[in-house]
């Protein structure tokens, strides 16, 4: 049966391993910082989009409000004309 040589973990080897692990975490931290910056840009884009859409919806709401007001005024004018016309016809029939 073959006997495997056992590695001994000296302080120097443990320090090397510790440094290697620290370098690995530093690279991961740098990548997370880049991801964080990307998310910040995406959040800024979403905020800009929301501001733009709110502005467009507000202008559309104002347009619809003014058109609704114009429609109501026009309908009142039309009904007034129709009422006056019918009242004139009835008066002409009664006294004519």
Image (cartoon, helix red, strand yellow):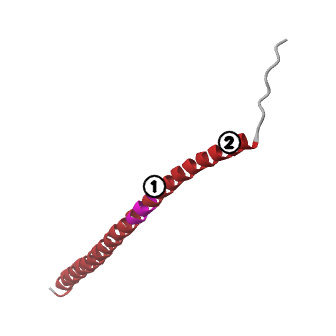
Which of the two residues, 18 or 86, is positioned nearer the viewer here?
18
Asked which quadrant contains residue 10, the reply is top right
Quarter placement of the N terminus: top right
Q: Position of residue 36 (x, y in %)?
A: 51, 57
Point out the residue furthest to the right here.
1
Quarter placement of the C terminus: bottom left
Which of the two residues, 1 or 56, is positioned nearer the viewer here?
1
Residue at the image point whose x is 24% and y is 82% from the top: 80
Q: Is residue 47 magenta?
A: yes
In the picture, the disc for residue 38 is: 1
Image: magenta residue range = 42-48
Q: Position of residue 61 (x, y in %)?
A: 35, 71
Q: Is residue 7 magenta?
A: no
Q: Which residue is mark 2?
A: 17
94 w.r.t. 8: above or below: below
Which of the two residues, 43 or 59, is positioned nearer the viewer here?
43
């Amino acid at each position: 049966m073959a006997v495997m040589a056992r590695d001994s973990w000296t302080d120097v080897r443990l320090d090397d391993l510790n440094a290697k692990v620290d370098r690995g975490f530093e690279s991961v931290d740098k990548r997370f910082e880049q991801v964080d910056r990307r998310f910040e840009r995406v959040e800024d884009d979403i905020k800009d989009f929301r501001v733009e859409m709110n502005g467009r919806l507000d202008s559309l709401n104002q347009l619809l409000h003014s058109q609704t007001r114009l429609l109501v005024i026009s309908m009142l004018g039309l009904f007034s004309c129709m009422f006056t016309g019918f009242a004139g016809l009835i008066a002409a029939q009664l006294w004519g």
